[in-house]
Amino acid sequence: MNIILIGFMGSGKSSVARCLSELLGRVLIEMDELVYQKTNTKNMHEVFEKGGELLLRETELAITQEVAAEKNLVISTGGGIVLNKITLDYFKAKGGKVIFLHSKFETISKRLEKGQSRPLFINAKKIYDFRLPLYLQYADEIIDADSLSINDIALKIQKMLKDYGL
Ligand code: S3P
């Protein structure tokens, strides 16, 4: 069973996924990295220059179809994965557990205000408000990512999986 981490940019998906994959001895998949490989780019700005947001979303879907068929992965998704309903439906249809790292907008905005690597961070509050219900709708589990350390979040997910009998 795959574990899929979702959440807004800067909610800690990549760090938690790295920690969790080590804790569980599972292979880590960083979807943004696979997007760069598939589109022959080096960063998100290049992806957007090459084909705009559409290229990103189409590539995310193609990657999902490949990785959802595998087992026991820890997958860190891009924050916009919830925009394409079919993508998360696909993960879930293959038995994946979707975990939402819930962070307040204020926390995220403080964390990301210095970074320039995310083309969609302009209009961030609007995007956040639009996406929050989508993250909640898709989540099998919700974790308050503001009150716990990366390590504690990973331990909490490990315990959840034990409770599922996994
Ligand atoms: C995006 C989030 C980014 C990346 C791209 C678009 C989004 O991933 O996929 O810049 O739409 O929220 P992170 O959530 O890992 O920053």
Image: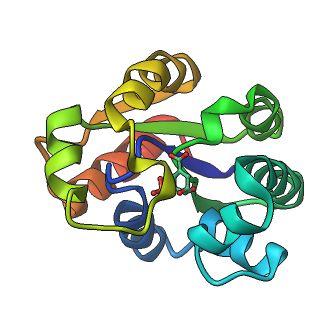
Residue at image position (52%, 35%) is 164
Q: How is the image coloured?
A: rainbow
Instruction: Name which quarter of the figure residue 55 lies in.
Output: bottom right
Q: Is residue 82 visible to us here? A: yes
x and y percent of residue 103 in the render?
Answer: 25, 37
Q: Nearer the viewer, residue 36 or 165?
A: 36
Residue at image position (15%, 43%) is 107
Residue at image position (47%, 20%) is 130
Q: Is 108 located above or below residue 92 in the figure?
A: below
Q: Is residue 29 visible to us here? A: no
> Horizontally, is 63 left or right of 163 in the view?
right
Q: Nearer the viewer, residue 143 or 104?
A: 104
Residue at image position (54%, 21%) is 134
Q: Nearer the viewer, residue 46 or 165?
A: 46
x and y percent of residue 139 in the render?
Answer: 52, 27
Q: Is 35 located above or below residue 104 in the figure?
A: below
**Residue lying furthest front in this view?**
49
x and y percent of residue 160 in the render?
Answer: 40, 40
Q: Is 18 located above or below residue 129 in the figure?
A: below
> Horizontally, is 54 left or right of 134 in the view?
right
x and y percent of residue 48 in the render?
Answer: 67, 61
Q: How many marks?
A: 0
